[in-house]
Amino acid sequence: MEFCTIGSGSSGNSIYVGTKHTRILIDAGLSGKRITQGLAELGISGEQIDALFITHEHKDHIKGAGIFSRRFDVPIYATMQTWEAMKNDLGKIAPHNQCFVYEDENCVINDICVRPFAIPHDAVQPVGYNIFAGQNKVSIATDLGHVTDTIRESITDSDILLLEANHDEQMLKNGSYPWHLKQRILGENGHISNHTAGNLLAEIMSGKMKYIFLGHLSEENNHPHLAYETVAEILQNSKIQLGGALKMDMAARFSNGAKVTI
């Protein structure tokens, strides 16, 4: 099972997950050209993508979805309400490529099983995703707003986890964003901070976890090294050691992140 972020942040999000037989994308919030380039760096062409799964309808998650689907005849999977919210932005999508997923129900694509789980965010029906292949589990959990029992249960026992660490609370509070935007980000349906991400990881950590990627970082209200050090300190205080069997890295904003294989 292979995992690689193609882009992660408020500028655009897309994640590749694949096996020898199946290749999927989670979100397509970058240009079609950038997604195609990111896949090419992995030795994959757009024609080889079997499915595209959308977490929610915000532009940084769907920007390139329509053009990618049309160019490579790729089915797009999303919740019913997400489809309604994003269909005008996607442009014309072939009927056979308009597909639905349902929270907590398995969607099987060849040898990959994708299971959406509900997340709190200011979108109509947002979801995170668990992706299973054999005994391996990858979880995508960004745009979280706040931590719920569903999120805890869904990301526990993942081999690979992409987790949001959107902002440093002090940077956000002292930054230049207008007050209404600060309230949105800090609110129950906004984004979680570095500290919240670290505390969540410490709470759900099991010996199965191999790779943590911190993603969806704010360009203005966070720094990669600050997110990493904040989360690493919380884990260390909880007697969870990074390095060796457990590795943590950052999901790059404008380029492919580290490719990992399990």
Image (cartoon, helix red, strand yellow):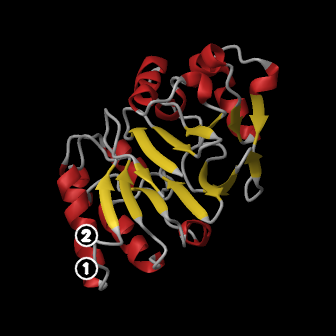
Camera-nearest residue between 190 and 126? 126
Q: Are marks 2 and 1 in contact (CB under 8 Å)?
A: yes
- What's the residue at 64%, 21% (across, down)? 69
Query: Which element is circle 1 on?
Result: helix
Q: Is residue 12 left or right of residue 53?
A: left
Within the image, what quadrant is residue 155 found in? bottom right
Q: Amino acid at mark 1?
A: Gln
Task: Note whether 234 is above or below 195 in the view shown.
Answer: below
Outermost residue on the right side: it is 96
Q: Position of residue 54 (x, y in %)?
A: 61, 38
Q: Position of residue 61 (x, y in %)?
A: 51, 34
Few, some or many residues within 10 Å of mark 1 (<14, 14–19, 20+): few
Within the image, what quadrant is residue 248 found in? bottom left
Query: Which element is circle 2 on?
Result: helix
Few, some or many residues within 10 Å of mark 2 (<14, 14–19, 20+): some
- What's the residue at 50%, 66% (across, down)? 147
Task: Note whether 10 is above or below 48 in the view shown.
Answer: below
Task: Note whether 99 is above or below 198 in the view shown.
Answer: above
Checking the image for residue 232, the label placed there is 2
Q: Amino acid at mark 2?
A: Ala
- What's the residue at 32%, 38% (across, down)? 253
Q: Position of residue 22 (x, y in %)?
A: 64, 41
Q: CA distance from mark 2 to mark 1?
A: 6 Å
Camera-nearest residue between 37 and 77? 37
Q: Which residue is mark 1?
A: 236
Q: Position of residue 82 (x, y in %)?
A: 68, 37
- What's the residue at 68%, 24% (across, down)? 87
Camera-nearest residue between 62 and 251? 251
